[in-house]
Amino acid sequence: MTRTARATALALAAALSLTACGGSDDDTAGEAAPSSSDAAFPRTVEHAMGSTEIPERPERVVVLDTGELDTVLSLGVTPVGAVTTAVSEEFLSYLAEDAEGVEVVGTIAEPDLEAIAALEPDLILSSKMRHEDIYAQLAQIAPTVFADRVGVVWKENFLLDAEALGLEDEARAALDEYEADAAALGEEIGDPAGTTVSAMRFVQGAIRVYTAESFIGTVLADIGLGQLQLPTDKSPTFAELSAEELTQADADVLLYSSYGPEDESGAATVVAGPLWPRLTAVAEGNAHAVEDDVFYTGIGLRAATLQLDALRELLG
């Protein structure tokens, strides 16, 4: 286990032990981590779609996005059901081990309502951005809590989901530990603001360069690193470039990945193309292929912690 992951795990374990009211040592799907007294339930949670009453501490949780899966596993809760991405029938690589045995209930784009209902959940977590159209149907199945959007607001979403689970104190402690470690990494680098990072991802033939308004942007900001600010069009989260515009993404450090196979995402063609060697980071040996699941597809505390671990090695 890396230093950051170990520190986060210890902080969460300490918070859990301070507030625990009991529980078993089994780590099976559907079990929630022990926390503060169940007297905290019933509770009403305010969220993007209104308010939801949660009568008892949730024990059978279904999550419908990568961020929610990251969150519940980070808090020691193994859900009974979760969705996968469009490019894989498996859970994200960095979550797969802890999510072993969790039922797949469709994809992010197409959750399987019948499969969700069959699991008899007592809490469903997702976001308005992803699943506003099916909120009413989900709410008929079980108490449902939606964040507003994803990405840059991951910390707020983490705390919201923790509130629904009754694990607010544990979540705050784990988040504080992450933020302290990000700041420590910035100090180790020395002058992080003097190093500009280009966060690049190849997606279906397009080149996306992520901004400060993205998940990875928040991690880079927590460290104190400089970031590119290219004009955005389709989304404030990223600028989209063509292969001919590649040099606009020039920076001191390049973190790039492929969403899906490289020959399908366009990564293979661009990396072998004539403009790639002209990038400063490439020319100076500071272009790093990173794991897409961790840096771009995944969202949440565990992904952010793993990013710190990787960046500590790459930039140290």
Image (cartoon, helix red, strand yellow):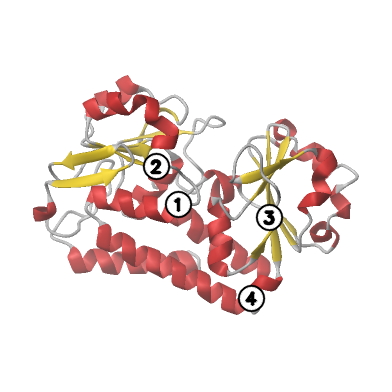
Contact between labelled residues 4 and 3, with CB atoms less than 8 Å apart: no
Q: Furthest residue to the top?
A: 114
Q: Residue at x 24, y 53 (%)?
A: 33
Q: Residue at x 76, y 64 (%)?
A: 252
Q: CA distance from mark 3 to mark 4?
A: 22 Å
Residue at disc 4, secondary structure: helix
Identity, as a three-letter code, of the amino acid under mark 2: Asp
Q: Position of residue 213 (x, y in %)?
A: 56, 52
Left or right of 293 in this view: 52: left
Q: Quadrant of residue 301?
A: bottom left
Identity, as a three-letter code, of the amino acid under mark 3: Gln
Contact between labelled residues 4 and 1, with CB atoms less than 8 Å apart: no
Identity, as a three-letter code, of the amino acid under mark 1: Val
Pick the residue in front: 292 or 249.
249
Pick the residue in front: 72 or 45.
45
Q: Which residue is mark 2?
A: 148
Neighbour tally class for label 4: few under 14, some 14-19, many 20 plus, Cα within 10 Å? some
Identity, as a three-letter code, of the amino acid under mark 4: Ile
Residue at disc 2, secondary structure: loop
Q: Identify the disc placed on residue 229.
A: 3
Q: Nearer the viewer, mark 1 or mark 4?
A: 1
Q: Identify the disc placed on residue 189.
A: 4
Instruction: Mark 3 or mark 2: name the one nearer the start of the chain.
Output: 2
Q: Quadrant of residue 114?
A: top left
Q: Residue at x 12, y 42 (%)?
A: 55
Q: Position of residue 75 (x, y in %)?
A: 32, 55
